[in-house]
Amino acid sequence: MFGLKRLYIEKAAQHDEVTREVRHRLVHLPAQIIPGKEALRLHSPLTPQDISWAKETLLLARQQGPFWRGCPGTKEYICCGYQILQVMTNCPMDCSYCILQAYFNLPALTVFTNWEDLWGEMEAKLAARPEKIQRLGTGEFGDSLALDDLLGLNRQLIAFISRWPHAILEIKTKWHRVEPLLPLGPNPRVIFAWSLNTPRLIRQEEHGAPPLEARLAAAQKCAQAGFRLAFHFDPLIYYPDWEKDYHGVVARLFAAVPAEAIAWISLGALRYMPFLKNIMRQRFPASRIAEEEFITALDGKKRYFKTLRAEMFSRLRQWIAAQAPEVFVYLCMESPWMWRQVFGYAPESQELSRRLDERALPHLPLEKSSDEQVSCLKIL
Ligand code: SF4
């Protein structure tokens, strides 16, 4: 499975049911029991070699902190209010631009196995505010679907949220194997959300990720099964033919799925912490995407000049509107200035969150805005 070569199990996690299931499915891999996950911490920060090693290494451990987390956003950018369930961290695919390479200090795909705590926490949070729409997902610190054959997590999450009328599950992914979940449809409160890019960028930069046609075919199956869809054009990456290629992706998207099935589409441009550039150069020497001109933005990340970002967002928005004017489009982690350039207005984070809630559950009354700080760290 994904070329996994090593399996480590934290001692405290060895008797968890998830651990037993995973060991059963990875029976060919000898497991090494370690006293705690710190035993795997080789270097801090991880070296490029550690990052590559991590892609072939699975760690089963116990979540010591909360599973359910608000996102660590920044005050300068408008955020969407996605709530993170941190059941796993890291990803078996290997995109050159992936921010996770610079984010974690454990060289492993890590799965937290104390799911009884996950269910307990979700139950308590949802019961505390049953009228509040909660858009939940596991897709901020990894891919929501890529390890599902191994974990069977989404099947359980779908069953769980089905009991809570205001809970939405957004399964953010680049992965394509949806067949085991199709019999769980129809369920309009499950939104499968694919990150899309141009065939050229998928081939050159998204190593191990399915091609565009496989993602769109999976989306089509999910729509036919009665789930809803979302798409994230993130990261948009500049290269000389970007207009023709992204326009082509928009056309293929709407040829593959009905616009009525789409809850929203987000747009985000390439951004990365400065030290990621060295990691990219060492791990992906053929990649040129970090060699363009960037500025250091208010959050310390490298971003394209705002004029280029505004042009890319506006073009995408125009192409989407030409195909499906009713589809809600938003910017991920962008400033009020950028929103005004692209849409002519700039929502507060809470307003964006509320509008996504309306799209998520259009048939239910909304709880008025809370004083919760909503934010997201968008990394897919
Ligand atoms: S960008 Fe997404 S799919 Fe690619 S390696 Fe990172 S988490 Fe995985």
Image: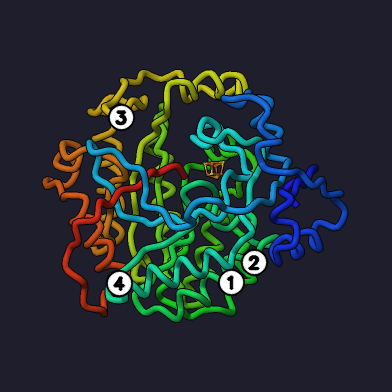
Query: SS at mark 3?
Result: loop
Can you give x and y, in whole percent of width and height, for residue 266 in the image? 34, 50
User: Mark 1 or 3 closer to N-term?
Assistant: 1
Of the four image quadrants, the one with ligand 1 is top right
Mark 3 sits on what residue? 299
Closer to the camera, 86 or 290?
86
Query: SS at mark 2?
Result: loop
Q: Based on the displayed image, in which of its 4 quarters is residue 108 positioned?
A: top right
Mark 2 sits on what residue? 152
Disc 3/disc 4 C-alpha distance (Å):
32 Å
Pointer 4 local density, CA inside 10 Å: few below 14, some 14–19, many at least 20: few
- Foreground label between 3 and 4: 4
Q: Please, is residue 360 above or below residue 75 in the view?
A: below
User: Mark 3 or 4 closer to N-term?
Assistant: 4
Mark 4 sits on what residue? 129
Query: SS at mark 4?
Result: loop
Disc 1/disc 4 C-alpha distance (Å):
24 Å
Pointer 1 local density, CA inside 10 Å: few below 14, some 14–19, many at least 20: some
- Residue drawn 39% across and 51% down? 250
The answer to whether mark 3 and mark 4 are in CB contact below 8 A is no
Disc 2/disc 4 C-alpha distance (Å):
28 Å
Mark number, residue 155: 1
User: Mark 2 or 4 closer to N-term?
Assistant: 4
User: Mark 1 or 4 closer to N-term?
Assistant: 4
- Residue drawn 32% across and 45% down? 332
Which residue type does callout 2 highlight? Gly
